[in-house]
Image: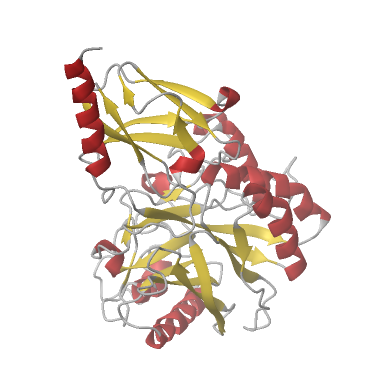
Amino acid sequence: MTLLTSFKRALLFFTLLLLGFQSFGQTRIKAMMYNLLNYSNSTVSQNKTPFLKTVLDEIHPDLFMVCELVNEAGSNYMFNNAIVPHNSDFEKATFQINQSSGANLQQMVYYNSKKLVLETSRVIVADTRDINHYTFKINTENVATNPIRLEVFVSHLKASTGSSNRQRRLASVEDFVVSLNDIPETSYVLFAGDFNFYSSNEEGYQRLIDGGNRVVMIDPINRPATPFPNNPSVTDPFTFYSSSSTYFWRNSSYADIHTQSTRTSNTGLIDTSGALGGLDDRFDFIMMSENFNTSSDLFYVNNSYQSIGNNSNCYNLSIDNSNCSGTYSQSLRDALLQVSDHLPVVMEIETPQNTLSTESYSQIVQFQNSNIVENSLDLKFSNNLKIKDLNIYNTNGQLIKSVKLKNVPENTLTIDVQHLSKGIYYLSAQNLNKPIKFVKI
């Protein structure tokens, strides 16, 4: 090696050390909402719990919001046998019995304690079922001096068609809107649940997104159904237009966002209490405050809202149907079928701040030789490897390559980087707080 070459490498390495981490120090939080279909500590629920763990292992939520919990014993069983085995960093909120109208199904949240700190919780008595309200602080490096709070509301609105059921859904939404008066109008808010809306034309949906609310709420995917025609002679458009799917989400043009029902038959399933009919309705939601689209402190990750397991080709079919293949695997769809007659929905939010207690790359990922490479990047990992994907970014923050870390032999990995242009790159992953840099020469 010539003196000049050694000098160039030293200069590159020194430059690398001086560069900041500002573009990569962010923390991403994945929120997930799931109707668990009458989950208790019964034999039926216990038998479907391994399938729930399969779902969690695939999705990796940080905030797990659920409805249709029957009792606290069921909550504890699920926590100990699906959630903790998935991620031992998870904690659970206090279980609170539903006080609304004698309803026997509860809501609950579980959360990654390395990213979220539960500050307070309360119950809002509403029509049909309670609305559970949780205030979290994001566990950033500045949590003590400048905390970012996340207000999370979870509910399960009245099911079924008909004017009276729509009005009861509207009544619960009104209870939620009134509760927004109890928090600062600049709050970051998520409102999640099985809302049982058949259309964005429903009074409850329209009230939820009313721009006059103290905290303005929006639908992250903004996929409204066709509005009813302006016909003054029609006093009840829901009944008048009920024979047409044009004005409802129950048509094939919305196949990619449907969440219910996952099944056309209950034959052979562990839990046979689920609704049938195939995937044809959008009942499950995570709504967010408008400031997630305008803030630089905490923001919605574009295109992160998904109906998990929905490959956009399963209209009126069971989610495990071979014709529903695509990005979501057969094994995941089989597991979803066993757990519930609903699909979970997810969305991601992000802050530029680092999470306080996430593990550092220096503990998890190390270079086998040097961070100055020519043809291959040789890495070794600690035995407690929890990350699933390793990403390579350039200095502009553009994703260059993503590597799956399944079945890493002997905790070592070689990545071919011959195709990369000369320069500085960063290795990053969701669960680790700071990237590491390497130089391609």
Quadrant of residue 93 within the rendered picture: bottom right
- Which residue is painted at 33% across and 55% down in the image? 221
Residue 439 placed where, x, y %? 27, 28
Residue 26 lies left or right of residue 366; in this view the side is: left
Q: Relative to residue 33, is residue 311 depicted above or below?
A: above
Residue 326 placed where, x, y %? 46, 31
- Which residue is painted at 79% across and 61% down in the image? 41
Residue 263 lies left or right of residue 355; in this view the side is: right
Q: Nearer the viewer, residue 299 or 287?
A: 299
Residue 392 placed where, x, y %? 33, 33
- Which residue is painted at 36% across and 45% down in the image? 253
Residue 373 placed where, x, y %? 32, 22
Name the residue at the top extreme.
Answer: 1
Q: Nearer the viewer, residue 135 or 43?
A: 135
Quadrant of residue 123 within the rendered picture: bottom right
Name the residue at the front extreme.
Answer: 3
Quadrant of residue 143 within the rendered picture: bottom left
Name the residue at the left extreme.
Answer: 4
